[in-house]
Image (cartoon, grey):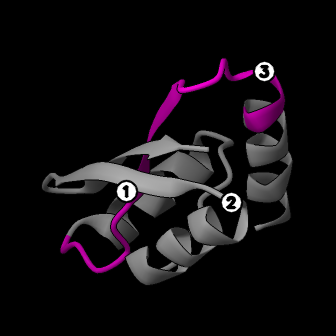
Amino acid sequence: MDYWQAVTAEVRRVLKPEGKFVFDVLNSEAALAEDWAILETYLGAEVYLAPISDWEKAVQAAGGKILSHRSGELFQMYCVGF
């Protein structure tokens, strides 16, 4: 999650006041999550198979507030304000 800390630090730096940060995370509990992670690894991407609760804690630790979220088949999208 070191990468996530660097990302949120930069987002907070460049985000306008009252701005929103929208991103998605892989739902590690989804049926296809492991298959997707293996495919992405073969393509050269780093994959974080962290539980959704860990992502939500990381948002809060960075000073963010989850304004809304949507669940999909494989990903969960978040809208966060700082």
The answer to whether residue 57 shows anywhere in this view is yes
Query: How packed is label 1: few (under 14 Cα within 10 Å), some, or many (20 or more)?
Result: some
Q: Quote the CA–CA distance across marks 2 and 1.
A: 30 Å
- Number of marks in the rendered image: 3
Q: Please give the residue where the numbered disc 2 appears in the rendered image.
A: 63
Side of 7 relative to 6 (left or right): left
- Asked if residue 49 can be seen in this view, the reply is no
First-in-chain label (2 vs 1) = 1
> Tag 1: residue type?
Trp
Task: Tell me the residue at 75%/36% (across/down).
Answer: 12
Q: Look at 54% across and 24% down and name the residue there.
A: 19
Residue 46: x percent and y percent? 68, 53
Residue 61 image offset from top left, x and y in percent: 70, 71
Q: Is residue 2 above or below residue 24?
A: below
Instruction: For the residues labelled 2 and 3, say whether their Cβ atoms are less than 8 Å apart.
Output: no
Identify residue type, mark 3: Val
Percent x, y for residue 66?
41, 56
Queried whether the magenta region covers residue 36, the answer comes back as no
Residue range highlighted in magenta: 12-31
Q: Residue at x 54, y 80 (%)?
A: 54
Between circles 3 and 1, the one closer to the viewer is 3
Q: Which residue is mark 3?
A: 14
The residue drawn where x is 18% and y is 74% is: 31
Q: Which residue is mark 1?
A: 36
Q: Is residue 69 left or right of residue 23?
A: left
Q: CA distance from mark 3 to mark 1?
A: 31 Å
- The quarter of the displayed image where residue 7 is located: top right
Q: Earlier in the sequence, mark 3 or mark 1?
A: 3
